[in-house]
Image (tube, rainbow, N blue to C red):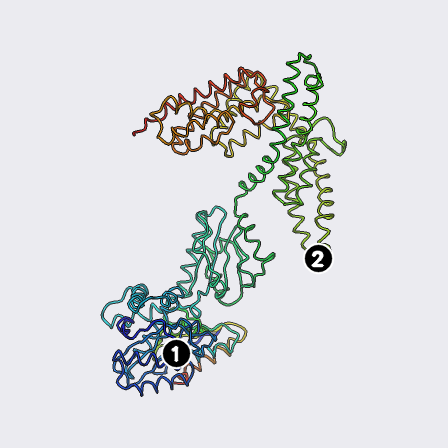
Amino acid sequence: MRITDLLAPEAIELGVSAASKSDAIEKLISLHNGAGNLSDVDVYREAILAREAGGTTAIGEGMAIPHAKTDAVAKPALAAITVPDGVDYEAPDGQPSKLIFMIAAPSDGEVHLEVLARLMTMLMDVDWRNQLLTAGSAEEFLKLIDDKEREKFPEEEPAEEAANDAAPAAAAAAPADDGAIRVLAVTACPTGIAHTYMAAEALNQQAEKMGISIKVETNGSGGAKNILTKDEIAACDGIIVAADKNVEMARFDGRPVLITKVADGINKPEELINQVIEGKAPVYAHSGGAGEASDESAENESVGRKVYKHLMEGVSHMLPFVVAGGIFIALAFLIDTIMGAPQDGNFGSNTPIAAWFKGIGGVSFGFMLAILAGYIGRSIADRPGLLVGFVGGAMAAAGCTFAEPAGQAVSAGFLGALLAGFAGGYFMLWFEKICEHIPQALDGMKPMLIYPLVGLAFIGVFMCAVNPIMIAINVGIGNFLTSLGNAKILLGLLLGGMMAIDMGGPINKAAYLFGLASIELGNYDMMAAVMIGGMVPPLAIALACTFFKDRWTETELKSAPVNYIMGLSFITEGAIPYAAADPLRVIPACVVGSAVAGAISMAFGCTLMAPHGGIFVFAVVGNWPMYLVALVVGAVVGALMLRILKKPVEK
Amino acid sequence: MFSEKVTLVNPQGFHMRPASLLVAEVGKFESTVKIIRNGNEIPGNSLMAIMAAGIKCGEEIEVQAEGADEEAAGRAVVDFIASGMGD
């Protein structure tokens, strides 16, 4: 017995306005009558009203199903109206009824129960209900019902006998609480590839076995799928959070939430679902309110990604100090060279003007480690992290220890500053959490007194304790680098190549940071190899575009001249569009060119004190003629490699 | 846990009125009441789910109750169904 067989188009009226329950009933009865379903209108009306007198047939959630089983019915049938503004049908939940089906059943047979069961099964789908309400025509309304019926009862045979068996079985398969999904779940694992989906699958299967409606949101690597809606969260029995990483929790505030491992979702789905439907899940109280949602999503990043982000925050703030200071210091040496000052211990400040450049440059340079650590700390712990980072960085630069608290000649260098920034930042993050428990009256004192004081004490003790180790490492690396001799050429090869591998990505940045750290140690040749390695890729591509036009597409050729400027300015990223279009050929070619340039630069002992600037700081490069040679050779080698590796483009 | 089988006696099966009366009966108790029919669990507090199941006269179903007052709840529900649920 299909709904669509019982519901004639002329028994449907959409967009009805009904002032009262009896208005709506009259409307439906006249629809039944108009469709020829009734043998006696008055007797049927009496039966309907008698049924309503025994208790409303509204079932809540905007639905009502008035019905009567009487001899006054000519043939089993349905009538339906939608009431967009709703009508007070004395629903148990007090909501106005918008979707009303009226059943007319003859007094013999079981049509009544079957139709009711089938309607209910379909009406549990909230989305589908809403589609019915917005249907534009009776035909569309019927089509929706037909589609839903096919979906819910796919095994249905046209024969009535088979349908009778299929309906109750399928109907019982997905019972839900007043149409709402009973159990919601969120699954997530750190990598977001396998366990997230295994847990979702296990929960879905178990729920189906138990005949309980469920919806599982998967927070996998491709982002959250099947996201739970506000209405679903508000209407469900409870939420299972089976996750090994942070998921957005603010939305579950005040709802029963069972928080567990993703493995439990895979291994114990039945236990979890039972706990939720039996109301044993504790009510979740979110600390901090909905505003934390963005923070929580940021926490979804991997640890490596977060560390990288904090590190880059520090580096990007530090760079201006190093670049400007480095150029000033290099200028001081240049001036003294031009003025013919003796190359003694005082070199760079023998003439007054050189001394001025060197002094001011040195002040700017001196901020390097403090700024780096300070902004790493701030990136981790926000403002409270700034002081610990700054002071820790400065202590690393000064080489403070318990024996020499005021500092000494040797520095804990870059590594010390990095440690200060991260240790200080994470300490403050932890300390801020601890401080949530102190009386609210002291809130105002936290940022002004408590955080700085405790932070300073912590970082003071911490840095004095670790500095001796960091100083030893720092000095060790410095000695190692100076002892390398000819092996330095290999290092130059490596650093130059690294700069070209991902053109601004983590490997590029690692080489760059090594160059920076070497500057701080007084080894200026590393930075020279690093910068030239970063300048070659765009230049090699620009050269190849100029001389080997058949290797490139029109658009690539058009934007090539810009790459000359990019390369000369040490903006490696200019090569990215070309590398992205053909990475397997372009990247190896660039790596070879950059490595050659880095090796040549190192071989001729070129030095660079300014960690940025490209061609514009060549004046301050030590042994700049050979540096220029290295650049040209590297770019030409890169361009030739591109010529060899890349296939001619068919135009 | 309380568990007992009972046969539906009211001639029209579990239609809307008995279903809503049953939900009201279940609501009087603290325990979770379920109806097991053909291996499917039907929550005893859900009017729509009970109606959707379309249980017919003469079918044997199982009533399960679990909670603080499970004995009383299960007993009341079984007796209510056995009595024909007002039909």
Location of the N terminus of chain A (image quadrant): bottom left
Indicate the chain on which mark 2 is placed. A
Q: Quadrant of residue A606?
A: top right
Dividing the picture into quarters, in which one does residue A469 lie?
A: top right
Disc 1 + disc 2, Cβ < 8 Å = no
**Mark 1 surroundings: few (<14), some (14-19) or many (≥20) residues within 10 A:** many
Q: Is residue A282 above or below residue B68?
A: above
Q: Quadrant of the C terminus of chain A?
A: top left
Q: Which residue is mark 1?
A: B16
Q: Which residue is mark 2?
A: A440
Residue A390: which numbered mark, if any? Answer: none
Q: CA distance from mark 1 to mark 2?
A: 55 Å
Do the dots labelled 1 and 2 sit on one chain? no
Mark 1 residue type: Met
Q: Chain of mark 1?
A: B
Of all residues, the one furthest to the left in this rendering is: A159
Q: Find residue A461 and report its horizontal and vertical position in percent.
A: 73, 39
- Vertical placement of residue A202 versus A535, above or below: below
Judged by depth in the image, the label closer to the viewer, 1 or 2, is 2
Q: On the rendered structure, is A99 left or right of A335?
A: left
Of residues A648 and A13, the one drawn nearer to the viewer in this rendering: A13
Q: Provide residue A638's location: percent of width, then percent of height.
A: 43, 22
Which element carries disc 2, helix, strand or loop? helix
Please tell me whether residue A415 is drawn above or below residue A72 in the rendered image.
above
